């Protein structure tokens, strides 16, 4: 899956999809697609990534407590 770095617009190929979907992981392993050669895998902060269309990542991928407000007290 490809995502885009929101700061510079460079594409990132996500190598570890389970890390992307797990809200308890703040980073995801990926390869930057900047330049002519594929780069070595590195950790990317998920909060600085977005879909290539510019849409933000779903809250359930970023925040493990995104539905806590729905709990009845």
Image (cartoon, grey):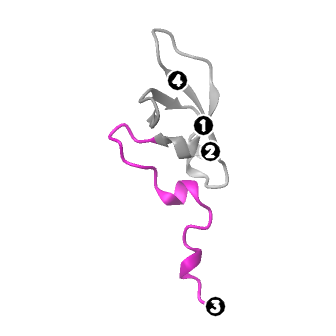
* Range shown magenta: 50-73
Dot 4 surroundings within 10 Å: few (below 14), some, or many (20 or more)?
A: many
Alpha carbons under labels 3 and 1: distance apart: 36 Å
Helix, strand or loop at disc 2? Answer: helix
Which comes sooner in the sequence, label 4 or label 2?
2
- Going from the N terminus, do you reach mark 3 or mark 4 first? 4
Disc 1 + disc 4, Cβ < 8 Å = no
Q: Position of residue 35 (x, y in %)?
A: 46, 12
Residue 19 percent across, percent down from the top left = 62, 44
Q: Label 4's element?
A: strand
- The Cα–Cα distance between marks 4 and 2, rounded to whole angstroms, is 16 Å
Query: Which residue is at 49% across, 29% downward?
Result: 12
Q: Secondary structure at mark 3?
A: loop
Label 3, label 4: how far apart the Cα atoms are: 44 Å
* Residue at mark 4: 32
Q: Alpha-carbon distance for marks 1 and 4?
A: 13 Å
Mark 3, residue position: 73
Residue position marked by numbered label 1 in the rendering: 16
Give neighbour class at mark 3: few <14, some 14-19, many 20+ (Cα, 10 Å). Answer: few
In the image, which is nearer the foreground, mark 3 or mark 1? 3
Q: Are marks 1 and 2 in contact (CB under 8 Å)?
A: yes
How far apart are the two marked residues, 2 and 3, measured between alpha carbons?
A: 31 Å
């Amino acid at each position: 899956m490809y995502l885009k770095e929101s700061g510079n617009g460079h594409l990132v190929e996500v190598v570890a999809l389970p890390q992307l979907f797990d809200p308890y992981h703040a980073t995801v392993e990926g390869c930057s697609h900047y330049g002519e050669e594929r780069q070595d895998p590195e950790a990317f902060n998920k909060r600085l990534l977005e879909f290539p269309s510019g849409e933000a990542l779903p809250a359930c991928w970023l925040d493990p407590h995104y539905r806590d407000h729905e709990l009845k007290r």
